[in-house]
Image (cartoon, grey):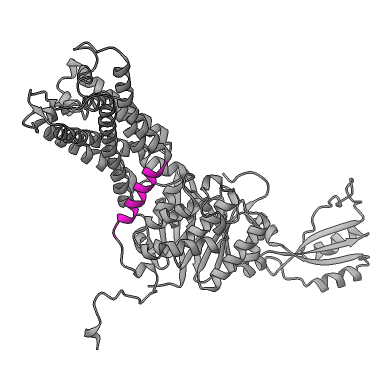
Amino acid sequence: MPSSVPADIPNTAGTALPAAAPRSSGLSLLASELRVLFGRRRTWALLLALAAIPVLIAVAVKVSSAVPPGRGPAFLDRITQNGLFVAFTAMLVSVPLFMPLTVGVVAGDTIAGEASLGTLRYLLVAPAGRVRLLLVKYAGALAFCIVAPLTVGLAGAAIGAALFPVGPVTLLSGGVVQPSEAALRIVLIAAYLAVSLAGLSAIGLFLSTLTVVPVGAMAATVVVSVVSQVADQLPQLEWLHPWLFSHYWLGFGDMLRQPLAWDSFASNAILQAGYVAVFGALAYGRFVTKDILS
Amino acid sequence: MNSGLAIETRGLSKHFGRQAAVDHVDLAVPHGTVFGFLGPNGSGKTTTIRMLLGLAAASEGTVNLLGQEMPGKLHDVLPRVGALVEGPAFYPFLSGTANLHRLDSASPHTIPATRRRRVQQALERVGLEHAAGKRVHAYSLGMKQRLGIANALLSPRDLLVLDEPTNGLDPQGTREVRNLVRSLAHEGTTVFVSSHLLAEVDQMCTHAAVMSAGKLVAQGPLAELRQAGSTRLRLVTPDAGAARQVLAGLGMVPDPPQAEPGQGEPAQPDGGTILAALPSGAPSPAVLPEDVVAHLVQAGVRVRGFAVERESLEDRFVALTGEGFDVAQ
């Protein structure tokens, strides 16, 4: 009685081999990617280096005499009164170079790193699927973009609280918030920076599909971020400024206003989404047709 | 839908710039065979394998793997194919077990619930269970090679593509791989082994194909390939001059006089060893070795030694691919 056969029995006419098994979701590979990324020593070294920035700032302020107001990076003069400002200062200081540097290492390594190890061919023969692998690799880079600013912010808050008094924080708009609210603002800034780095990660992913030398893709990604920031400083290129992916990188001051101003967050997110779309498409176009000869 | 071939390529070609790395290759690998894919370094074996597995796109021609077109049906075919391509490659900072877990989870077709057990079994099958927890960084080449084979065996496979599987293995390991391949073939898996080592193919394969400079120059059952080679006779006589005349009269072309092994000077023109290919029917009529001896004796040639030598697979290989260390261009 054929009608009683459940429809979901796999067709085993050919063989009873894995091909007949239902396809599981792609989460297995994503979990594996995150385990490998955050399990390897290099990632830890990058995060430790980022965490060292607030520690360095806090210790320097602690051992030196009071910082005269208006000198050094923004917020620096406020640290002695409120340790939470270590987090804000450190995030501000690390945005132009240190964060793009670490993101460049991770994003530039995505495909080129696998290619140079030779594991790319085994992932593809598994078969991981080229589009799926690209998506998982980008997701891994994004995860790092989330963790990196959080590391700076949380390490800053921790060392600031350890070395300085913690109290209500005076925001840029003049309002005062409790330390718990200030901690939330630190997380918000980290989110802002994570979004800011999404475009650079997509550029790194694309550059990574072009080469089998990961260091090349890493360096190129970092250079691109520096060039973008330099171009953003040149008045002659003013027409270009709103299109540069680094244009809103330092705009996270809006997260320190009361009430919260979301304008720069939204403009930044739209701009980054554009970069992700363009360079994601380029990476896709390059990677799905690429001959894997490494 | 199934032509009975595990691997079938038609006119498969790959050009790098102007150069054809693989030039109109028509491979036919029957199901259930252990198929040796022979050729000197640079003859296009690995490029062919890359195209079989969908890693590189063919410039021309088609590939059918297990009856399905590649790379179109890649996601249906590759879960049934285990592969070792151009040497093992792993994450040096992960352990052997972690590496296999990683590569197994790369495929959406594998079942996570059985992963631990399958990894364990694969490691046992290649004798790596004791080094499973060590980082691959600390592995020897032979151990990596074993891990690469273990990776190919993580799931039950219909086809195994092994590119130089015994590279870097000690004689013990080589024998183990040979036994492993035999037992896999016994279970019904088709094994496609590339190698530049003739002895290896000779000992483990049922079929073979020979590549030379990007072209497929021979393929078929091993026994047939051997037979396609010529048979030659070795004659030792003091009357070399007369013997040559007799052989020439029978339509044979004796080799020019050669230095005898162990002797510094060329042999005397009137004595020594003569080598000649025995015509097998075409172009000259077939000659039986016993008739040759009868003719020699009738002509008064004194025969000290007479032997019929079948060309070894190695001779055949050299005849097909050319001699020397020159990498094929």
Which residue is at a point 51% across and 53% down the rendered structure image?
B133
Front residue of this view, candidates B193 and B313 = B193
Asked whether B132 falls inside the magenta stretch, the response is no
- Who's the residue at 88% across and 61% down the image? B236
In the picture, measured across the screen, residue B167 lies left or right of residue A174, that is right
Q: Is residue A285 visible?
A: no
Q: Is residue A277 above or below residue A186?
A: below
Q: Which residues are magenta?
A: A25-40
Residue at the extreme front of the image, as rendered: A165
Which quadrant, please, contains the N terminus of chain A? bottom left
Up/down of B240 relative to A220, above or below: below
Residue A179 pos. (x, y %): 16, 31
Count of marks placed on residues:
0
> Horizontally, is B298 left or right of A198 in the view?
right
Q: Position of residue A257 (x, y in %)?
A: 9, 28
Q: Main secondary structure of the magenta part?
A: helix
